[in-house]
Amino acid sequence: MEWFVAPDYWLSRLVFQRALAAIYLVAFLGAAVQFRALIGERGMLPVPRYVERVPFRRAPSVFHFRYSDRFFAAWAWAGVLVSAGLLAGVDGRVPLWGAMLLWLLPWVLYLSIVNVGQTWYAFGWESLLLEVGFLALFLGNDEVAPPIVVLFLMRWALFRVEFGAGLIKMRGDACWRKLTCLYYHHETQPMPGPLSWFFHHLPKPVHRVEVAANHVTQLAVPVLLFTPQPVATAAASLMILTQLWLVLSGNFSWLNWTTVALAVTAVDFSPLTGEKHFARTPLWYEVVVLAVAAFLLFLSYRPARNLLSRRQIMNYSFDPLHLVNTYGAFGSISRLRLEVVIEGTADPLPLADADWREYEFKGKPGDPRHWPRQFAPYHLRLDWLMWFAALSPGYARPWFGPLVERLLDSDPDTLRLLRRSPFPPDSPPRHIRARLFRYQYTSWHELRTTGACWKRTYVRDFLPPTHLGTAAGGNGLPD
């Protein structure tokens, strides 16, 4: 059926598939490298303990049937290998049904990880990767032209990402309506990047223009995705440019890159590539795609209703398979940047004048002279959660005590998540404390004279001096 396919979008599909494979690769790599300290058998929030209290129907995962650190590592590294194969284009060298099975593999593998990842995986980009990854199963390979209905579902997902984020801002913090949120955001965002300091110091009128442009891109432009070409291409291109601007301004895991990949599927490259001919689409494939599309449109009812609701929620999955979700970010903006600084001492008594030494994280601000680095699309999960800990200590209670306990024990898996430990592995500290500091960007003059991009001011104690035996329960954490 000619109406079923859109042969002009073969290059859009190809670029999208390779980009998605690269994102999968990064996601699995991060899981393989970081899981032991976070959700491993001796992790801060162990998977075995989680699956004991959460039934399979609420969080489908292979780890309900079996868990060991060795098995999880094999599972995650298998995802790395499959993703690398898809990135290399293996799906184009097998029959259509084989390509669909190949794209099913990373989706199943990553779903099992996300559904036991608990708070470490409670981010919108996890659900977005799974939703988009599921749609990728039905895009086909070089044997057939891309199905129009799947391309439509890609645009529907992109619409919800952008429009949902725009609505949550307009319904949320007043600074979005006043166009002033970027006076603070580049300084207070979860994990600044190497250019965030410069973004923060742009003139305030530029910040206001940025916010106004964001509103246009997220609230007006997404509607144009469903218009004829070349308008839809122009809309998608504007979204891509906006997402790349966000990539430069901070570390937001693979959220921006997945959105870029989605937007590429709405770009018509045919004026540049010319016409390409495909074989007739198999009937079984058409039936499967149409049936799945009808099911996904049925599931879209609740996300669509959420967009219209005054009580809009963001980054929420309405089904345990993460097939159709709701998205959004930064409905409210912090005016102050608070950071938890963890320190240890080997002194027998944890007095105020003891030799307290600071632990350094890879991504989150610590040493005021340490310039932020670019990590995204790689996701430093502990660093991100430390930002939330500073905002809401109660949110961190389940895992912060276990983190301190593992630092007191010089747990090698935990120390590998850090940039630097001030203590040798064989000489752990006797006590650890955590203090809350306010961080501010330095001015141009302060940067030139001190070389520091941050200045910090002590606010209060976050966790009093703690030793082994009292740390695991997070004793002493404020509410």
Image (cartoon, rainbow, N blue to C red):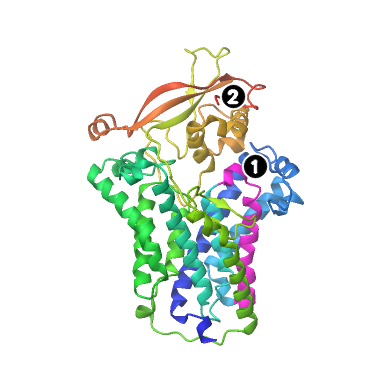
Q: Which residue is mark 2?
A: 427
22 left or right, relative to 332: right
Horizontal and vertical percent position of residue 81: 60, 61
Quadrant of residue 215 within the rendered picture: bottom left
Pick the quarter of the image with the N terminus: bottom right
SS at badge 1: helix
Q: Which residue type does callout 1 highlight? A: Ile
Task: Mark 1 or mark 2: name the one nearer the start of the chain.
Answer: 1
* Front disc: 1 or 2: 1
Does any portion of residue 25 appear in the rendered image? no
The correct choice, above or below, for 46 with respect to 224 in the image is: above
Quadrant of residue 475 within the rendered picture: top right
Q: CA distance from mark 1 to mark 2?
A: 25 Å
Does any portion of residue 236 appear in the rendered image? yes
Q: Main secondary structure of the magenta part?
A: helix
Residue 309's label in the rendered image is: none
Q: Residues within 10 Å of mark 1 (few under 14, many from 20)?
A: many
Quadrant of residue 131 within the rendered picture: bottom right
Residue 39's label in the rendered image is: 1
- Outermost residue, right side: 65
Q: Which residue type does callout 2 highlight? A: Ser
74 left or right, relative to 346: right
Horizontal and vertical percent position of residue 232: 38, 70
